[in-house]
Structure formats: structure tokens, C-alpha cells
Image: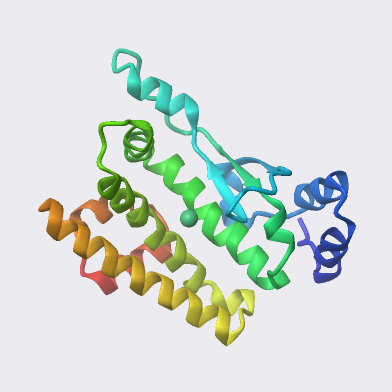
Amino acid sequence: MTQVTEADYHAAKKSKNPKVRQEFLDAIDLEDAGEFVRRINYEIDDDANTSMDCGFNYDVMYNYSRILSPIKPLRKSIIRVFPIAFKNYSYEFFLSVLIDHEGHHARQDFQRPIYSAKLTNQRSSTHTKPELRDYLETLQEIPAEWNQLEKATKRNLSQKERSNTVSKINSYRGLVSSYAAVFGRDWKLDLSKILCNSPYDDTLREVYGIN
Ligand SMILES: [Zn+2]
């Protein structure tokens, strides 16, 4: 599959027509994330404060909440793309967020379904402390940002886009280590549970000293 071009992205940006944008999304080659993603949906939600998200695998959550039925892994995620994704991004960064970041979350859901199910249950539970929820969510962001950084050269990201990604990783890392101290958790151990079979997660294991 050939990748969409910068001109295609700018045409979809300019058009604002949801059909045109959906057709553009359908034409994207998700590369190594393709096997973990069922589809990409364009959603007109102007209140969305994010450009994209990776829809959780509800079948897994359903099964997790009913321990009697076995967890069904190997389910693909749905990535939702909101209008913000067609506002300020460069073409390169758009692909980086879609394929390397959200695609990595899809990989996490696919390869680490139990952790993802737990996270979603805790997210929706009123009993979970918001700080603990933040902690778990932030942990999941570190490998996704890392993946973007590892592929920055391939994507031809600008210096600014790269340094923003580095700053995000550093602030997430600071956040998880301070939450971990409060909750008495070992953040590297928690992180190890969501790392996937991916060469980029391997470099993260190496750099953070995770076995
Ligand atoms: Zn993310």
C-alpha cells in the first residue's frame, strides 16, 4: 500500500467535509500498526480536547468484568480522529500521532489486553482514586511517545516536534515516579507489564533498565 501524501492531508484539512476526511483516513497505510487496528473513524466532535484516541477493546473489558468468561485477546482497536487533528499538525506529525502513537496504543490493547482491561475498569470505577487513574494512564503514554521519538527520523519530524516529544516523555516520567512514591508502587515494574513485542519497546527497556 502506498502512503497518503502531504497534498492529500492538506486537501482533507481544507475540505472540512467529513466524507472527504474519512476517505483520506481510509487511504492511510498504518504500516506496522495495521495488524492491530480494525478501522479509523472520523468523528465530528468539536468539544473533543484531543486530536485522536484509540478506542478501547470493549469485548475484552466485558470479559474482564465477568471473570467466568475467558478474556478474548487478539482483538483490534478502533482509532478515532477528531477535527483538531486537521488543524495545527504538520503532515509528518499527523502520521506520527496516528501510526506511531495511537497505533502503539492499539498494539498495547492487542498484546497486553489484561492490563488494558484493568486500566479501563479502573478508569470507569468511582472507587479508583483520580491520582491512581492518572498514574496508570500516564504509564501507558510513555511507550507511545517513545515510539514516536524512535520513528522521528523515519517520519522526518522537525526539531521542535522532536523536542516536544522528549519533554512529554520527561514530564510523564516525573509524574509517574512521584505518583509511584505516593502509592508505594514500583513504576518500572508496572511499566514492564504494558511493554510490547516491539523493537522500540526493547530500546525503552534498555534505557530504563527494565528486564
Ligand atoms: Zn496516548
Residue 5, by quadrant, is: bottom right
Label count reads: 0
Q: Is residue 24 above or below residue 77?
A: below
Residue 66 location, x and y as percent? 33, 16
* Viewer-closest of 207 and 198: 207
Question: Which residue: 45% across, 60% down?
Answer: 144
190 left or right, relative to 201: left
Is residue 81 toward the left or the right of residue 168 in the image?
right
Left or right: 67 with respect to 141? left
Q: Residue at x 80, y 70 (%)?
A: 6
In the image shown, does 97 or 121 lie closer to the viewer? 121
Q: Is residue 159 above or below residue 140?
A: below
Residue at image position (30%, 45%) is 130
Q: Residue at x 35, y 14 (%)?
A: 69
Say whether residue 184 is left or right of residue 94. left
Q: Position of residue 18 (x, y in %)?
A: 83, 45
x and y percentages locating residue 126 in the rendered image? 31, 31
Q: Residue furthest bottom?
A: 159
Q: Quadrant of the N terminus?
A: bottom right
